[in-house]
Image (tube, rainbow, N blue to C red):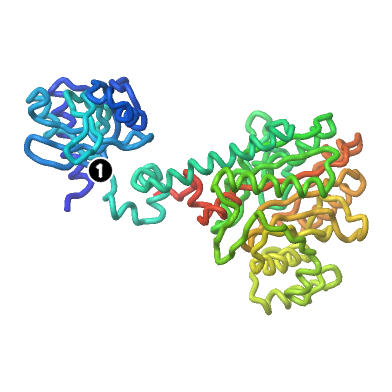
């Protein structure tokens, strides 16, 4: 078997043959009248069969021998066959094709449309030109790229040899477009907020830190899609806003977690908690139907239907039922002992982290669709207290397939209470909790000016990957990969 260097050397010689012939192997423009998807319309109109035109694409296969070759082209819109016959074009041009063209090259072919004896729609080539000469081969069609890191590093080849991957990313575009259209139709205004922040806010996560040379200060990549900024807009007179954008969290990798991913957050002044829940259900059903054509899914050993009734699960009650721990009154030692008994690994040896870890153990057993509600204040520092129990908050999480898919709050707009919450988070930071929330005094100042009652909700591309049934890394075009 030839090595890559040997293959490259042979192809370099073929490139030289093209140049000696006077054909530019890397032209800036080529002849192309129709895409490969569009050319099929020629065959719907029988009168257009026999029309002369030009098509272009990457050669995915060449079969045949002697005076006739069947060439399969792919231009990203579809595939189509060109038939290259020795007696249909200049003899020297045909010989050059045999001597200088490889699978993986991009070519432009000019000829007439016809149907082969086997009934295959084709273009009978009269002439051809090189569009891009490839110096390295494509992966073997059936073997593909086997090494996981190499496959993601060379994602373009992975997609090229696996058409089903391209379909996933086309669905992902439809997924986010559906979200955007839905919210705009509900009178939300799309906004852009900073990705570089002096203090991170809107979530509990370890941030990435970098240095701003011009201001000579450290800044952080955002960990939420502008939660504290969008709330400022509520104070500024916007009624409804949303943003779809990248967030960054310097944490571990898992099938559901990456350090860079896309999230959506919306905020609606004067929207009640019940109105918000109805809107979330409507949004999720719309996205599922438009993107996947169904609301029924079976993933990760769970089966659920978004059209079913969404159950409400009480945070404290659910954890107690499944673990025996009453998180509001339990001591840290009791929580620690229970986590060790359950074999749950957890980060952060404080009550907030252990409370969250106990819930996550329970969550894996819930298929959904469900809302987890009534979160303890400790794990919801930006949410208003529940009117019936001040130890709880008006918070909800979407639970599907044993995972959290999104979180919503009746947003805290009490500046005095918010200051106390930030102070508690600051204590956790000093104790070494790298995921605790930073204090944002300017945000508190905004609250002192006044922010209307607001409902906020956010979810990320984990929802898409879950509905697709793939790890989140597989549903990103170019996930971060360590260099060789």
Q: Is residue 114 left or right of residue 398?
A: left
Residue 130 location in percent, x, y? 23, 27
Q: Is residue 468 left or right of residue 332?
A: left
Residue 442's spot in the image, x, y percent? 83, 37
In the rendered structure, the answer to whether residue 333 lies left or right of residue 118 reads: right
Single out the residue that lies furthest toward the bottom: 341
Q: Which residue sits at x=58%, y=43%?
A: 290
Residue at numbered disc 1 = 137
Name above or below for residue 445 compared with residue 468.
Answer: above
Say if residue 196 shows up in the picture: no
Question: Residue 61's spot in the image, x, y percent?
Answer: 23, 42
Label 1, secondary structure: give it: loop
- Regarding residue 201, the answer to whether it shows in the image is yes
| Circle 1 residues within 10 Å: few <14, some 14–19, many ≥20 | some
Q: Which residue is nearer to you in this view: 210 or 480?
A: 480
- Identify the residue shown where x is 86% and y is 71%: 329
């Amino acid at each position: 078997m030839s090595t890559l260097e040997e293959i490259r050397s042979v192809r370099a010689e073929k490139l030289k043959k093209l140049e000696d012939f006077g054909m530019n192997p890397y032209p800036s423009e080529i002849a192309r009248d129709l895409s490969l998807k569009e050319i099929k319309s020629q065959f719907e109109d029988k009168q257009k069969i026999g029309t002369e035109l030009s098509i272009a694409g990457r050669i995915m296969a060449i079969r045949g021998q002697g005076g006739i070759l069947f060439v399969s082209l792919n231009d990203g819109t579809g595939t189509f066959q060109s038939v290259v016959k020795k007696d249909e074009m200049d003899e020297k041009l045909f010989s050059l094709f045999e001597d200088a063209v490889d699978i993986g090259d991009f070519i432009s072919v000019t000829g007439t449309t016809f149907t082969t004896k086997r009934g295959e729609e084709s273009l009978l080539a009269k002439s051809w030109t090189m569009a891009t000469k490839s110096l390295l081969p494509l992966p073997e069609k059936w073997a593909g790229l086997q090494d996981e890191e190499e496959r993601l590093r060379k994602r373009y080849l992975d997609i090229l040899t696996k058409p089903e991957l391209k379909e996933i990313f086309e669905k992902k575009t439809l997924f986010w477009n559906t979200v955007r259209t839905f919210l705009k139709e509900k009178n939300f205004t799309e906004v852009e907020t900073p990705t570089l922040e002096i203090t991170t806010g809107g979530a509990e996560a370890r941030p990435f830190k970098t240095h701003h040379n011009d201001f000579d200060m450290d800044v952080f990549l955002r960990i939420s899609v502008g939660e504290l900024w969008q709330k400022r807009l509520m104070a500024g007179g916007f009624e409804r806003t949303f943003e779809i954008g990248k967030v960054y969290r310097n944490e571990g990798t898992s099938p559901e977690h990456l350090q860079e991913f896309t999230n959506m957050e919306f905020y609606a002044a004067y929207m009640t908690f019940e109105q918000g829940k109805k809107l979330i259900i409507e949004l999720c059903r719309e996205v599922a139907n438009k993107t996947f054509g169904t609301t029924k899914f079976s993933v990760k050993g769970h089966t659920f239907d978004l059209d079913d009734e969404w159950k409400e699960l009480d945070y404290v009650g659910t954890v107690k039922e499944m673990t025996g721990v009453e998180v509001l009154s339990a001591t840290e030692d009791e929580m620690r002992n229970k986590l060790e008994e359950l074999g749950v690994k957890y980060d952060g040896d404080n009550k907030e982290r252990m409370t969250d870890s106990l819930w996550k153990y329970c969550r894996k057993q819930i298929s959904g669709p469900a809302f987890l509600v009534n979160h303890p204040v400790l794990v919801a520092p930006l949410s208003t207290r529940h009117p019936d129990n001040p130890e709880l908050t008006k918070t909800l999480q979407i639970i599907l397939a044993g995972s959290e898919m999104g979180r919503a709050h009746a947003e805290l707009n009490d500046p005095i209470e918010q200051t106390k919450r930030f102070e508690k988070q600051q204590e956790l930071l000093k104790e070494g909790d790298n995921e605790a929330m930073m204090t944002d005094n300017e945000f508190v100042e905004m609250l002192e000016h006044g922010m209307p009652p607001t409902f906020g909700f956010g979810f990320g591309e984990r929802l898409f990957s879950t509905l697709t049934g793939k790890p989140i890394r597989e549903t990103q075009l170019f996930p971060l990969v360590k260099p060789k």
